[in-house]
Image (cartoon, rainbow, N blue to C red):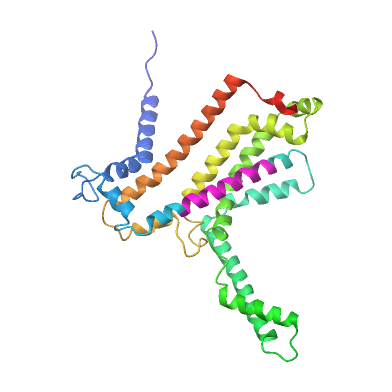
Amino acid sequence: MTEGRSRAFYLLSAVFALYTLFLYGPTLTILVLSFQGPNGGMTFPMNGVSLHWFHNLWAGIGVPNVVDALKNSLKLGLAVTLATVVISVMAGYAFRRPFKGANLLFFTAIASLILPSIVVSLGIALEFQLFNQGISGLGDHLVDSYVDIDNATAWTNLLGNLGIAIQDNFQTLMGLFTSGFGAHLTWTLPFGLLIMFAVFNRFNPAYEEAARDLGASSWQTFRHVVLPMIAPSLIGVALFGFTLSFDEIARSSQTVGAVNTLPLTLRGLTTTVTTPVIYALGTVTTAVSFAVIATAILVMLIVQHRRRRHGSDAGRALA
């Protein structure tokens, strides 16, 4: 006879069920309530089912500039993803061979993982404020020193005009793709580095040696041998990079300048919006994240299907 389940099994099963409910319950609740009818409220029971609040969201009724915020998050997320993938691959390649200061550089690169995000955000904002003050001070100095002076030369006129241009046009270096981009990269890049370091640590260099023995160049070896083998890992790095950037709030709060990302807009609306339109916004945000995950899975399935159908393209390196 087989023994029955112990009490510990049922106890741990109940704990896991409660954990799952706690983890996904809020998301499912927001998803359901976002489809409230036009007269629906912020809580149950449901008062009809419709897409009314999604229409209001898209039209900007009660939630102004939400489309712009979504575009900002998508553009920043894609830029951060691209940078994370490229830098992670290059760093993984570089760290395959030992060099002086490798450990210091490694721990410096991943140190931002243990730093509070709000501290990183404030530090970057302060850094860019210092840059702004320096540039503004340079413009004032050039104007004071080289505008309306005696015995002016072409060089002094150039410097004076440069100072005037700075005073008239310069506002701030802070923005979505400057300080905001850097802040997000401090969060996504360490994950990309850790993934690629693990990948290349297990990578067998014999494949590259075989390609070179067959006459392949360094670029052909990377393109036709290394890249197809690490492609699934690159998809994982890209997935990490985009989702972490798209959902980030703390590191965006002080660094994106005058514009807003979608998470910042959502956080600001939690204290002002009293209709289910905020649930519709939450559902859209979640849908974007799931769409990215689905796209990554689809790409991986396509790559695997291509490999099964055509085999490796390593032999094409000499073509």
> In the image, is 272 to the left or to the right of 89?
left
Q: Residue at x 45, y 52 (%)?
A: 71
Q: Farthest residue to the top: give it.
A: 1
Q: Farthest residue to the bottom: give it.
A: 150
> In the image, is 168 to the left or to the right of 158?
left
Which of 24/14 is in front? 24
Q: Residue at x 32, y 40 (%)?
A: 28
- Where is residue 47? Give x, y as percent: 18, 45
Residue 75: in magenta span: yes
Which of 9/118 is in front? 118
Q: Is residue 195 above or below residue 307?
A: below
| Quarter location, residue 224 | top right
Q: Is residue 133 above or below residue 286?
A: below
- Where is residue 80? Give x, y as percent: 56, 49
Q: Which residues are magenta?
A: 72-91
Which of the image's four quarters has the N terminus?
top left
| Quarter location, residue 307 | top right
- Where is residue 142? Give x, y as percent: 67, 81
